[in-house]
Image (spheres, coloured by chain):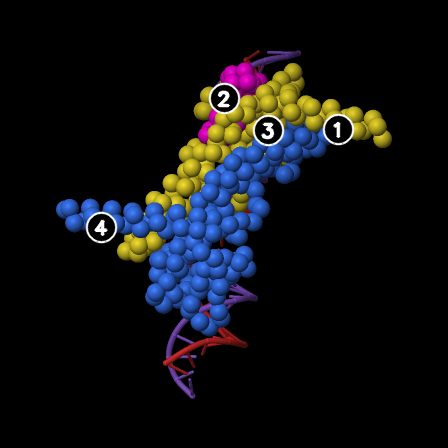
Chain colours: A blue, B yellow, C red, D purple
Amino acid sequence: MRVSTRFSDSVHILAFIEVYSKTKLTSETIASSIETSPVVVRRLMGVLREAGLIDTKKGSAEPKLSRPTNEITLLDVYLAVEGDRQLFTLDTSTNPECIVGGNIQKVLGSYYEDAKMAALRKFNNVTLQDIIETILVEQKQKEQRQLNK
Amino acid sequence: MRVSTRFSDSVHILAFIEVYSKTKLTSETIASSIETSPVVVRRLMGVLREAGLIDTKKGSAEPKLSRPTNEITLLDVYLAVEGDRQLFTLDTSTNPECIVGGNIQKVLGSYYEDAKMAALRKFNNVTLQDIIETILVEQKQKEQRQLNK
DNA sequence: CTTTCATGTAACTTTTTAAGTAACAGGTAT
DNA sequence: ATACCTGTTACTTAAAAAGTTACATGAAAG
């Protein structure tokens, strides 16, 4: 398949809404930062709205975060857009008559779960505030490097 | 895109080779346990061979593990088939002129790396021997449940 | 030594999933 | 009332992996 960038783009949208909260936040504007189409942005924002992460009003370009940035974690965003889709993909059609084929799904699946959980725990410890603050620090460094030239 | 089951299928192949080491191990036989085509199996086995996990001989249906099962980890298999592909996908085309678009890749990317590393560390602690022993225990439980009916 | 069977590999097709595009009904606001 | 924007549907395109076909070449048994 085409690799999904929905998680990545959703974090982008949330960070953008916060960083540019003083400006006009049309799906067009946000799309130009992500370099995608406005429809893709509106679709993702629909998902984020349903997950209770943002508030939007039809017809009006004023999306707002539903909670402070330090109360939104990467895990919240991940779960909003990916749900409980498996992270490592099990082959779910294996021969049940075979010792290996008949048991590997359950066995491998549980190790996959452990690994996924380890990753999601990391995401639960990172907030949107962390992301934004780090972005702003990176930006200042970048500007300083420009000046030093 | 279609979701890849290569990691899953590769573990399947390795476990199958060990569990059924006394039988004739054609790509056809292995494929019937995975419920896929022999070509897919041969392709994956090619990858596993290049990664030094199995030894095969052209024309002869006698694949062998290159190392004992307790010296092959899920991480070895994962790296063999997935390489260092990103686990969580960054959107790599964002607007560099924007504060968010210009920095989010680096920032999010590093959190993605942390999460991926946490997952891979789990995989590095699980050996093929663990997988096989657990499969065999599951199988015995299954057989016992049959008898109790 | 030839027949049978298997591997390794290339080329092509199909399937799947998400992104991109077009269109539009219905709010919002000046 | 006019201009703009969202939310949503339907359709098209793109990308990646799996499935399929085909075949050259090696192995091994009679």
**Which residue is under mark 1?**
B142
Residue B42 on the magenta span: no
Q: For the residue marked with disc 2, what is the amino acid?
A: Leu
A104 over B129 or under it: above or below: below
Q: Kindly identify which numbered label has been placed on residue B12.
A: 3
Residue B95, percent from left and from top: 32, 55
State how far apart marks 2 and 4 are (Cα): 48 Å
State how far apart marks 2 and 1 are (Cα): 30 Å
Nearest to the observer: residue D6 or residue B14: D6
Q: Earlier in the sequence, mark 1 or mark 3?
A: 3
State how far apart marks 4 and 3 are (Cα): 51 Å
**Which residue is under mark 4?**
A143
Residue A29, percent from left and from top: 36, 64
Q: Kindly identify which numbered label has been placed on residue B53.
A: 2
SS for callout 3: helix
Q: For the residue marked with disc 3, what is the amino acid?
A: His
Q: Nearer the viewer, mark 2 or mark 1?
A: 1
Q: Kindly identify which numbered label has been placed on residue A141.
A: none
The answer for which chain carries disc 1 is B
State how far apart marks 3 and 2 are (Cα): 13 Å
Answer few, some or many: residues within 10 Å of disc 1's Cα (few below 14, many 20 plus, some between 14 and 19): few
Q: Are marks 4 and 1 in contact (CB under 8 Å)?
A: no
Residue B62 on the magenta span: yes
